[in-house]
Image (cartoon, grey):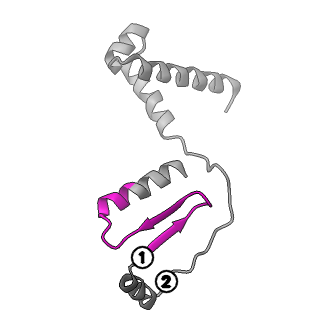
């Protein structure tokens, strides 16, 4: 990307931030700033399609999953079938009667902030 393109991209990033902060519709914002609606749409699409760079490249971590027999014995003993330890301070336990919606929401949140 050449210097001119970088400058143009930075300009449009600022314009898009301004648009979201304005509370105006796309049409209103474009009229106010004398920008064509199609050009504005192009830059919003261009910015939202940028590939996200991974925060850090880490070696894969392998975990041993429990066997069916271990899971059955955990159910009988009252232990949670799934325990996830992310750090000393973060521990997630999912019980057998956990609603699917709650688990899906948890996974989505972890993906978003991982």
Q: Please provide the residue range marked out in magenta.
A: 82-105
Name the residue located 43 percent from the left edge and 9 percent from the top edge.
33
Answer few, some or many: residues within 10 Å of disc 2's Cα (few below 14, many 20 plus, some between 14 and 19). few
Q: CA distance from mark 1 to mark 2?
A: 9 Å
Q: Position of residue 83 (x, y in %)?
A: 49, 70
Mark 2 secondary-structure assignment:
loop
Q: Give the left or right position of residue 12, taking residue 30 as reference.
A: right
Q: Give the left or right position of residue 100, taking residue 110 as reference.
A: left
Identify residue for label 1. 81
Q: Position of residue 59 (x, y in %)?
A: 69, 65
Which one is nearer the viewer's eye here, 77 or 9? 77
Q: Give the left or right position of residue 109, taking residue 97 as reference.
A: right
Q: Position of residue 3 (x, y in %)?
A: 70, 25
Q: Is residue 7 above or below residue 101?
A: above
Identify residue for label 2. 66
Answer few, some or many: residues within 10 Å of disc 1's Cα (few below 14, many 20 plus, some between 14 and 19). some
Of badges 1 and 2, the one in the foreground is 1
Which one is nearer the viewer's eye here, 60 or 12? 60
Do callouts 1 and 2 mark residues in contact (Cβ within 8 Å)? yes
Q: Position of residue 89 (x, y in %)?
A: 59, 57
Answer whether residue 20 is magenta in the image. Answer: no
Name the residue located 51 percent from the left edge and 80 percent from the top edge.
65
Mark count: 2
Q: Quadrant of the N terminus?
A: top right
Q: Give the left or right position of residue 104, taking residue 54 as reference.
A: left
Name the residue located 41 percent from the left edge and 88 percent from the top edge.
73
Q: Is residue 79 above or below residue 110?
A: below
């Amino acid at each position: 990307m050449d210097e001119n393109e970088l400058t143009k991209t930075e300009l449009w990033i600022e314009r898009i931030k301004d648009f979201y902060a304005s509370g105006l519709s796309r049409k209103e914002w474009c009229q106010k700033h004398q920008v064509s609606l199609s050009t504005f749409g192009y830059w919003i699409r261009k910015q939202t399609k940028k590939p996200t760079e991974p925060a850090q490249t880490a070696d894969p971590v392998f975990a041993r999953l429990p066997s069916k027999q271990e899971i059955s014995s955990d159910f009988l003993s009252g232990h949670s079938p799934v325990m996830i330890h992310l750090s000393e301070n973060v521990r997630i336990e999912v019980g057998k009667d956990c609603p699917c919606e709650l688990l899906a929401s948890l996974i989505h949140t972890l993906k978003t902030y991982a």
